[in-house]
Image: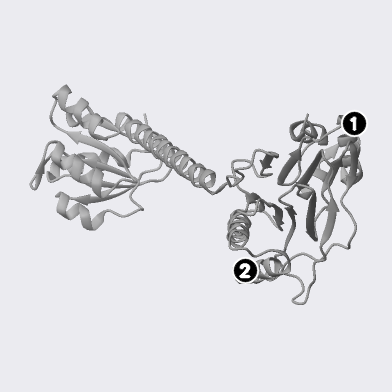
Amino acid sequence: MTAHLSEPLTLLLIEDDDGDALLVEELLKEAGAPPRVHRARTVEEAKARLSPEIQCVLVDLDLPDARGLEALEQVLALAPYAAVLVLTGLRDMHVGVAAVQAGAQDYLVKQDVDARLLARAIRYAMERKRADLAQLRLVQAELTAQENARLESGLLPVALLPSTSVEHAIRYLPGSRGTLLAGDFLDTVQTPDGAVHVVVGDVCGHGPDEAALGVAMRIAWRTLVLAGQTGETLLRTLDSLLRAERKAPEIFTTLCTARIAPDLGGVRMRVVGHPPPVLVRDGVVTVVEGAPSGPPLGIFTDAAWPEIEVPLGAEWSIMLYTDGLIEAAAGDDEEPLGVEGLVRLVREHGDVDLDRLIAQAGALSDDLAAVLVRRRASR
């Protein structure tokens, strides 16, 4: 019966005995798709013949320059990409087990091999090697994913908010599966004067470059705030940073900043091409308005971003968010929620509940970041 190999192969036979080598080559010629066979008489000679085109190696364990498992270990080190079969005259079963444990895909005794057995062993060895390499790639991918997750977790912000006078909550949901970071960013910092500073921003686009840029923008914002920079000066510095760090000139960033006064009685905001914040003040839900929104960062070199000043009552909540929240599909018609829909949901709740809002907003189609700062009236 004719032996069959499932695909044309290129093999390397490492065998110093001419008679045994001839026998193996004749057996391989009986295969339905005879492989191309290269031969080496020693491990040293095999070094020059091993290349990525070699898919399978047949190696004797009794060579002039290497004996036993030493020969196998050297071949495995030289050809980690190839299936390796031990083909030897030794009938010791313990040697066979040790060879497989060392990394060989199979162990054949020369005297017991015929064309059909040899072809089948090669075919099975190839499949085992493919499975081994696939498993190795999977493990490497899992380790890389774990390292990336640890890195991304370390880049997420921790609010600098020592005051207990306000409540603070954030939600951060990247739209891309398998990631922790996206182009959206947020942060909260309380400066020594007692003022609470908040930012929520959105770098246009999706992917690791945008996520990295978002992290850079957030860290720059925090550094500037801690250094005492606010308002127009802060925004112009962020605009310069964006232009220096972005990968393409069409990349822009929208954001909203808020500075809540130390006495918590008022807030100053700048809306930079961004959705307007939602304010719940003494039970009344409104969208923060009062001045035109300036353009996104990275668009115009002479842009201006007007300040919005809003008085706050004894009890209030402010939510800053990215457009991922209002672009979520709400209801059976799958229409975006929009700002009006967001306000409607807040009114139905009577206050801002981030988890309930996100759940009722619908299916997210974009990254989402939201910050809630709340002051309860003293009882």
Q: x, y percentage for residue 217?
A: 62, 60
Which numbered dot is residue 110? Answer: none
Q: Amino acid at mark 2?
A: Leu
| Residue to which mark 2 is pinned | 241
Residue for point 76% across, 49% down: 322
Using the numbered discs, state the Cα–Cα distance from disc 1 to disc 2 in whole angstroms.
41 Å
Residue 85 lies, in percent from the top left, at 26, 36
Q: Position of residue 61 (x, y in %)?
A: 14, 38
Left/right placement of residue 178 relative to residue 76 reads: right
Task: State the image coordinates of residue 362 (x, y, percent, origin top left).
Answer: 81, 35
Tell me if residue 106 can be seen: yes
Sequence order check, earlier mark of 1 and 2? 2
Asked whether 121 or 144 is in front, the reply is 144
Which residue is at the far top? 93
Q: Is residue 317 above or below residue 250?
A: above
Q: Of residues 315 and 24, which is closer to you in this image?
A: 315
- Res 41 seen here: no
Report the amino acid beneath label 1. Glu
Decide: is 219 above or below 69: below
Element class at badge 1: helix
Which is more toward the observer, 236 or 22?
236
Kindly identify the residue that appears in the image at 25 percent across and 49 percent down.
Answer: 78
Image side of residue 132 versus residue 344, left or right: left
Residue count near mark 2 (Cα–Cα under 10 Å), binned few <14, some 14–19, many ≥20: some
Is 115 in front, or is 254?
A: 254
Judged from this view, the residue extending furthest toward the left is 64
What quarter of the picture does the N terminus occupy? top left
Label 1 CA crowd tier, 10 Å (few <14, some 14–19, many 20+): few
Left/right placement of residue 364 relative to residue 349 reads: left
Which residue is identified by label 1? 348
The tally of labels here is 2
